[in-house]
Image (spheres, rainbow, N blue to C red):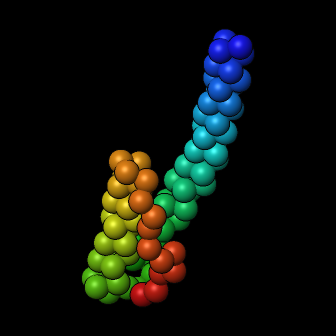
Amino acid sequence: MNALIYSIESNIMKNREKKFIELAEKRMTRLIKQIKLVGNLANKSNYIYTDKQASKIIKTLNDELNDVKQKFRNSKNSKSTKFEL
């Protein structure tokens, strides 16, 4: 009986890991594309922006990355998802 329970728990954990990998790969691929698009905003040939605006974008990216790092360390929730300049 214990072997059966262990087998079931092991399958559940494998399924959860498989789902994590699937979602992580999809989300990271989308995120990388979006970050590159934000990086395109730095092209002064196409856009005009202040140092303050650029700094706010960089700070927000850093803050959100730090929140993700913290979540992976101790699973805490993050703050607002809305960004405004």
What residue is rendered at 68% in x and 21% in y? 5
Along the line of sight, the residue nearer the viewer: 5 or 75? 5
Residue 29, x across and y down, in percent: 59, 48
> In the rendered view of the protein, which quadrant contains the C terminus?
bottom left
- List x then y, in percent, for residue 55: 29, 77
Toward the front, the furthest residue is: 1
Please state, as top left, top right, bottom left or bottom right, where the N terminus lies in the image: top right
Q: Check the image and report above or below for 11 versus 40.
A: above
Picture layout, residue 6 above or below residue 39: above
Q: Quadrant of residue 43?
A: bottom left
**15 relative to 29, above or below:** above
Location of residue 52 (image quadrant): bottom left
Locate residue 57: give its quadrant. bottom left
The residue shown at (48%, 77%) is 80
Q: Nearer the viewer, residue 3 or 27?
A: 3
Residue 17 visible from this viewpoint = yes
Q: Position of residue 32 (x, y in %)?
A: 52, 53
**Front residue (pair 42, 80):** 80
Residue under the image location 64 percent in, 19 percent down: 6
For residue 39, say whether it is visible. no
Q: How many marks?
A: 0
80 versus 22 height, above or below: below
User: What x and y, as percent, mark residue 82?
Assistant: 51, 80
